[in-house]
Image: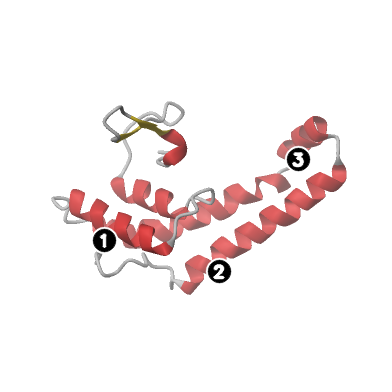
């Protein structure tokens, strides 16, 4: 899943529809929710995240195990994003970017930026005690 506004289309009625042709298929709502809330490119205020969590958990209300799965999946998805942000350090990715950018200083700065983002994500998950932080709505 890659649920986010970058995969949204607005219908003439104003309603949003989410499409994702890259990762087409069925996914666990717990992973989708965690991905949406933790996606590094998602810059939603905490209040919007709270509102989203409340509404989406209500939407999936018939799934009485969703909140329990979120407790396990949320920190794992956070770690996944930490690792994705460190792809700049993978030699094959670095070589491809070096060829494309031809600016080693910019690539070095990109590595530093990505490392800082990854550390910030890890700190966020640790500060949340490795749990889904919206406990007012989840188990």
The answer to whether residue 60 is seen in the rendering is: no
Left or right position of 121 against 27 = right
Characterize the local packing of mark 3: few (<14), some (14-19) or many (20 or more) Cα atoms within 10 angstroms: some
Residue visible at 59% across and 51% down in the picture: 83
Residue under numbered circle 1? 68
The answer to whether residue 126 is seen in the rendering is: yes
The residue closer to the viewer here, 47 or 40, is 47
Residue visible at 13% across and 50% down in the picture: 62
Q: Are marks 2 and 1 in contact (CB under 8 Å)?
A: no
Q: Secondary structure at mark 2?
A: helix
Instruction: Single out the mark in the foreground, 2 or 1.
Output: 2
Q: Are marks 1 and 3 in contact (CB under 8 Å)?
A: no
Indicate which disc, 2 or 1, sits on the residue closer to the N terminus.
1
Left or right position of 82 against 61 = right
- In the displayed structure, 44 sits above or below 126; it is above
Q: Which mark is residue 94?
A: 3
Residue visible at 19% across and 49% down in the picture: 59
Residue under numbered circle 2? 123
- In the displayed structure, 131 sits above or below 58; it is below
The residue closer to the viewer here, 90 or 78, is 78
């Amino acid at each position: 899943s890659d649920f986010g506004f970058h995969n949204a289309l607005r219908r003439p009625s104003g309603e949003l529809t989410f499409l994702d042709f890259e990762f087409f298929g069925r996914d666990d709502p717990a992973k989708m929710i965690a991905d949406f809330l933790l996606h590094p490119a998602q810059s939603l205020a905490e209040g919007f995240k709270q509102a989203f969590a409340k509404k989406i958990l209500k939407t999936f209300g018939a799934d009485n195990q969703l909140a329990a799965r979120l407790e396990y999946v949320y920190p794992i998805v956070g770690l996944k994003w930490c690792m994705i942000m460190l792809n700049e350090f993978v030699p094959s990715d670095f070589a491809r970017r070096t060829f494309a950018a031809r600016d080693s200083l910019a690539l070095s700065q990109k590595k530093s930026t990505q490392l800082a983002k990854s550390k910030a994500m890890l700190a966020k998950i640790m500060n949340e005690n490795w749990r889904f932080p919206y406990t007012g709505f989840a188990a």
